[in-house]
Each structure stands twice: as C-alpha cells, then as structure tokens.
Image: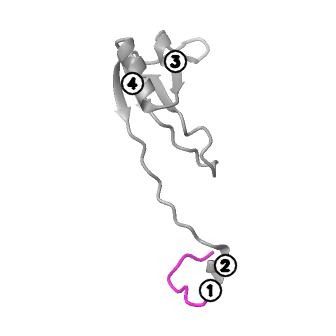
Amino acid sequence: MLARIYKPAKTAMQSGTARTRKWILEFEAEQARSIDPLMGYTSSSDMNSQVKMSFETKEQAIAHAEKHGIAYQVIEPKSGKRSIRAYSDNFKFGRIGQWTH
C-alpha cells in the first residue's frame, strides 16, 4: 500500500491559489479497475483508492503516514513561472516579434 503526498496544482480555470495550499495524502490503486459486463461501469474492490486526506503541512502528512506504517512518496510542488505584463504592452511602439492577437 503506497501513498502519494503532494500539493495539488491549480486548475486551468483558476486564476488564484484556492485549494492549492494544503498537502494531500492519497493512496495508489492496488488493483486495476474492472468493467461491469452488464452496465459498462468501471468498478474496483480497492477501498483505499477512494481515500484522500488533507493536511496543513507536509510534515503533518509524513507524520501521519509513519504513525500508521504507510509507505509514502513525497512529490514536491513545482514553482510556477510568472510573467507580469500590462494590457498596454500590446500597443507599445517597439513590439516587433512579440505576441500579437
């Protein structure tokens, strides 16, 4: 039973950092999902794959995993590259070779 500890990235629809501040402990799937032959639903008998716990800090998540004897893998978050641009930069004089719309 392996768990991943990570900090979720923001979705493409977000402009802020909501729901990206907490660390998540999530279990890896131990069994592959199976397809129900009658209805076509995907199902799994692995209940741990449904568990997702959130923690304030990475150290709290690691301490919880070690306390309960869970093997874990920590995935460090990647820092985003921000380029601050003003709307008026689209219309400045010397913008040859830059982004246009």
Q: Nearer the viewer, mark 4 or mark 3?
A: 4
Q: Give yes or no for residue 93 being in the magenta stretch.
A: yes
Helix, strand or loop status at disc 2: helix
Task: Provide the major secondary structure of the magenta segment.
Answer: loop
- The residues bearing labels 4 and 3 have C-alpha atoms spaced at a distance of 16 Å
Q: Would residue 1 be visible to someone looking at this image?
A: no
Amino acid at pointer 1: Lys
Query: What number is the disc on residue 62?
Result: 4
Nearer to me, 42 or 99: 99
Q: Residue at x 51, y 42 (%)?
A: 9
Give the answer, above or below, for where 16 lies relative to 24.
below
Part of the protein shown in magenta:
92-101
Nearer to me, 12 or 72: 72
Name the residue carrying label 3: 51
The 10 Å Cα crowd at callout 2, few under 14, some 14 to 19, many 20 or more, is few
Name the residue carrying label 2: 88
Q: Is tag 1's residue or tag 3's residue first in the polypeptide sequence?
A: 3
- The residues bearing labels 4 and 1 have C-alpha atoms spaced at a distance of 51 Å
Give the answer, above or below, for where 84 lies relative to 47.
below
Nearer to me, 47 or 34: 47
